[in-house]
Image (cartoon, rainbow, N blue to C red):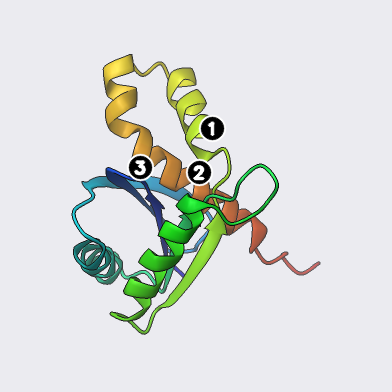
Amino acid sequence: MRVLAVDPGERHLGVAVSDPTGQFARPLTTMRHTARAQDAARIVALAVEQQAEVIILGSALDSEGQVGPQARHAEKLAAAVRALTTKRVVLHDESFSSQEAQAGLRAAGKKRRDRRADRHAAAAAVILQSYLDANSRETPPE
């Protein structure tokens, strides 16, 4: 099952997609934020194009695990996406995904300019991999 994930930011939306088996995440693209309705339509179009069955939206909780302004933004975007599709739309905690993505890009030897361009999609891949790992099914014993 292919899954699409979005890291919704104030200016950019990072997008990642899983492999067809739903085990591995990879960065897909970064989109510039325009308006919620337009962002939602582009997310749904990418989900259809990528044949994703589930759409994950990163939701940033504050340090106490409470819903803050960023999480409310993600909830509103999720509602707009749900209004446009019958695909399952899930909010998933994205705490520290940007920092983890930056560290991964730095470890991969990416130059600062390249890290800046790739960080949103890389953060979406971190969110997606977290979701996939948390929801993976154990393989039955032989």
| Mark 3 vs 1, N-terminal side | 1
- At numbered mark 3, what does the secondary structure look like: helix, strand or loop? helix
Find residue 138 and report its horizontal and vertical position in percent.
72, 64
Q: Are marks 2 and 1 in contact (CB under 8 Å)?
A: yes
Residue that numbered label 3 is attached to = 121
Residue 80 placement, left or right of 130:
left
Quick one: 116 or 128, which is closer to the camera?
116
* Residue at image location 21% in from the left, 46% down from the top: 32
Residue 50 placement, left or right of 56:
left
Residue that numbered label 2 is attached to = 126
In the image, what residue type sits under mark 1? Glu
Q: Is residue 133 above or below residue 49?
A: above
Residue that numbered label 1 is attached to = 100
Q: Is residue 51 above or below residue 101?
A: below
* Residue at image location 43% in from the left, 25% down from the top: 105
Give how far apart the Cα atoms at labels 3 and 2 are.
9 Å
